[in-house]
Image: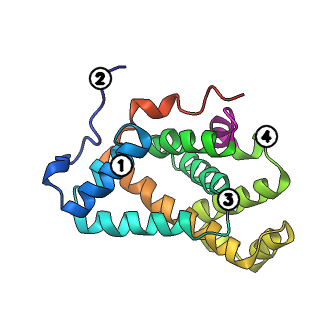
Amino acid sequence: MADQEPAMTRFPVPDVEDLPEDLQARIEEETERAGFTPNVFKAVGYRPEQARAFLDYHDALVEDSELERAEIEMIIVAVSGVNDCLYCIVAHGALCRIFAEAPKLADQLAANHRTADINEKHRAMLDFAVKLTENQTAVDEDDIEGLIDHGFSRKAVWDIGAVTAFYNLSNRLAHLADMRPNEEFYQMGRDQT
């Protein structure tokens, strides 16, 4: 494996041992689960109080959702592609490939969700997420009704919007910090059949 890039280049990367105990425990849990420490945990640790809020909101979005985890990751990758966010394209691209069990999907979504191999329901979901990202003031009730017509509940529409909004924030933080993806993410989920 090549030398790991730093978690971020524009701000000091804290040593995990110097972080508050609850964040150390969270990082240890994620490291155990992934087999490596995703750089986002080290990067957001730069501001521990904000890291807690960031991680808690992330957890609420993925644990209390009307959406399937693959759908959440699809939204993240499509939005991150629009925002040119390398960290989230690579890291969540890996998760998208794994949860969707589709080794090519994340690359397609990051480049252009409109040409990806997805069904009409998911295309409508991603059209909405991209519209909310690129032209949020144009989103109206017709957009919401369109998603409902595709089989999403009103709560699911909220969840699509909440994931989109959170990852617009996350993409901007990643850009600000010049957050770098771990080498491990690049190959995860690619050898599925």
Given contact means CB atoms under 8 Å apart, are the residues at marks 4 and 1 in contact?
A: no
- Image location (x, y in percent) of residue 19: 18, 57
Vertical order, 69 against 180 (above or below): below
At numbered mark 3, what does the secondary structure look like: helix, strand or loop?
A: loop
Magenta stretch: helix, strand or loop mostly: helix
Q: Mark 2 points at which residue?
A: 3
Disc number lying in front (2 or 3): 3
Give the mark nearer the N terminus: 2 vs 3.
Answer: 2
Residues at badges 2 and 3 in contact (C-beta under 8 Å)? no
Q: Earlier in the sequence, mark 4 or mark 2?
A: 2
Residue, disc 4: 117
Q: Label 1 to label 3, Cα distance in Å?
A: 23 Å
Alpha carbon distance from label 4 to label 2: 34 Å
> Looking at this rendering, what residue extends furthest in the top direction?
1
Three-letter code, disc 2: Asp
Q: Quadrant of the C terminus?
A: top right
**Which label number is shown at residue 19?**
none
The magenta stretch is 101-112
Residue hosting label 1? 40
- Depth check, mark 1 against mark 3: the one in front is 3
Query: Does residue 60 show up magenta in the picture?
Result: no
Q: Give the residue pinned by disc 3.
A: 68
Which badge, 4 or 1, is on the more N-terminal residue?
1
Structural crowding at the residue carrying mark 2, measured as other residues with C-alpha within 10 Å and reported as few (<14), some (14–19) or many (≥20): few
Q: Is residue 14 visible?
A: no
Seen from the viewer's position, the closer of residues 180 and 64 is: 64
Q: Which amino acid does label 3 sit on?
A: Glu
Q: In this view, does 44 lie to the left or right of 108?
A: left
Helix, strand or loop at mark 4: loop
